Amino acid sequence: MSISIKESMQKFAVQQALNYVEGNPEENIPKLMEMADKVMPDGYYEEVRAAFRKAIEEKSNWYQLMLKVYELDPGVRKAFFQNFLFNSAMKGTAIQHENAKKYNCNVPWAILLDPTSACNLQCTGCWAAEYGHQLNLSVETIDSIIRQGKELGTYMYIYTGGEPLVRKKDLIKICEMHPDCEFLSFTNGTLIDEEFCQEMLRVKNFVPAISLEGFEDANDGRRGQGVYAKVQNAMRLLKEHKLPFGVSTCYTSRNLDDVSSKRYFDLLVESGALFVWFFHYMPVGNSAATELLPSPEQREKMYHQIRSFRETHPIFTIDFQNDAEYVGGCIAGGRCYLHINAKGAVEPCVFVHYSNMNIHDVSLLDALRSPLFMAYHDNQPFNENMLQPCPMLENPERIRKMVKETGAVNTDYQDLESVDHLSDKCLPYAENWAPTAKRLWAESHPCANCGKCKE
Ligand code: SF4
């Protein structure tokens, strides 16, 4: 069967299933699951189906989350299913795999972009604090990246910054230019207003992830008086307009107790967020504050708390540094994603500011085949223990070696950091964390250290 016929049939089947659920989700989700179990061959997506079945039977927090998706604006939900589930996850993944094989390089599921280095806030310790300091990717450049990305099978685009919504009109224009892609934007949330909500409802394929670092004191202490109230207002507006949104939270030695608390998770669920994306503080840049790095005890606390709230709270939670086991290790270097900064430097990861290529000079495919990206491709995973996935944070000798061998240069906007400075700074953290990582990994994966069944 040709790919396009198979694709059309898959698309039709998915659409029929989704339309069926639309009418009465509470009644039809369980029925659809029963049908899926009858028609799917034994073993096909068995674990996923078992998880769904369990969620439905127990009416668990995951089931509550499914129902929350059905409270969203129907047009936005339809676009999300079409773009995220079908174009990105099903069709896109197949094309990515084909191209990865054909070109012998990584092909990403998502591309992260900084539309601008500018920001409207002046947060303590953030390089983007000077609003006048601006670098931008033009609409034409972003459009070209997306066109090239789609050829390779990439339908998911994520904005970082700077504050992407400083350019919200351009971002809406890009949503219109590529209605078959899903766009997610990290944002401080302060520029989300009634007019922007109406624009999101109109284009349907834009999802904000609002930065939150704990409760009011912690947020306003870092971001400025009144910012927390503005963020709450943005969430209220999004919820009222039935728009999907999430939260992004960076955990540090200072806010970890707050953001790993039940009170914080309750707040997120109450605000209407559908997902929360936790990031471990990364000591990137010459002036990084290493005292903000969580201690091993704190990181372990985060690990346990998030796993426990996944059983109770109707919110999809990602812990970027502790979840590598679900995605086979480091996802950077185009394995699942890459990052393009506002100058056009193509970087393996949003936290790894080294590159051989600029998107203004080369094609996306050439960037994926550049020396540093090929070093990622050839060396992943960087550690068998998935609680030590990073070539920088937990295995700093790996980033030192890759950068030196590939001749990649630092891409920081204003203060270039040598790879020796970065790696030396990460070493004590890596050494401190290793024993805890080893113990946690052995506890959760007893087979990894046993090997008896192979004897
Ligand atoms: S380079 Fe490090 S931070 Fe970036 S995706 Fe890989 S493991 Fe995560």
Image (cartoon, grey):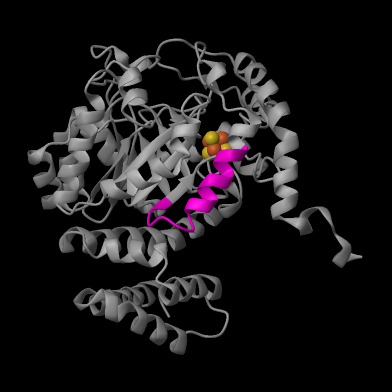
Q: Quadrant of residue 452?
A: bottom right
Q: Is residue 85 magenta?
A: no
**The C terminus - image quarter:** bottom right
Question: How many numbered discs sit on the rendered protein?
Answer: 0
- Tell me residue 175's x, y (percent): 20, 46
Q: Quadrant of residue 171?
A: top left
Question: In which quadrant of this rendering is ligand 1 seen?
Answer: top right
Q: Which portion, as a residue range, is magenta?
A: 300-316
Nearest to the observer: residue 406 or residue 254: 254
Furthest residue toward right: 455
Residue 108 visible in the snapshot: no
Residue 216 visible in the snapshot: yes
Specify whether 233 is left or right of 386. Answer: left
- Tell me residue 176's x, y (percent): 16, 48
Q: Residue at x 63, y 40 (%)?
A: 389
Specify whether 448 is left or right of 98. Answer: right
Specify whether 338 is left or right of 373. Answer: left
- Tell me residue 413's x, y (percent): 40, 16
- Tell me residue 47's x, y (percent): 55, 71
Nearest to the observer: residue 13 or residue 227: 227
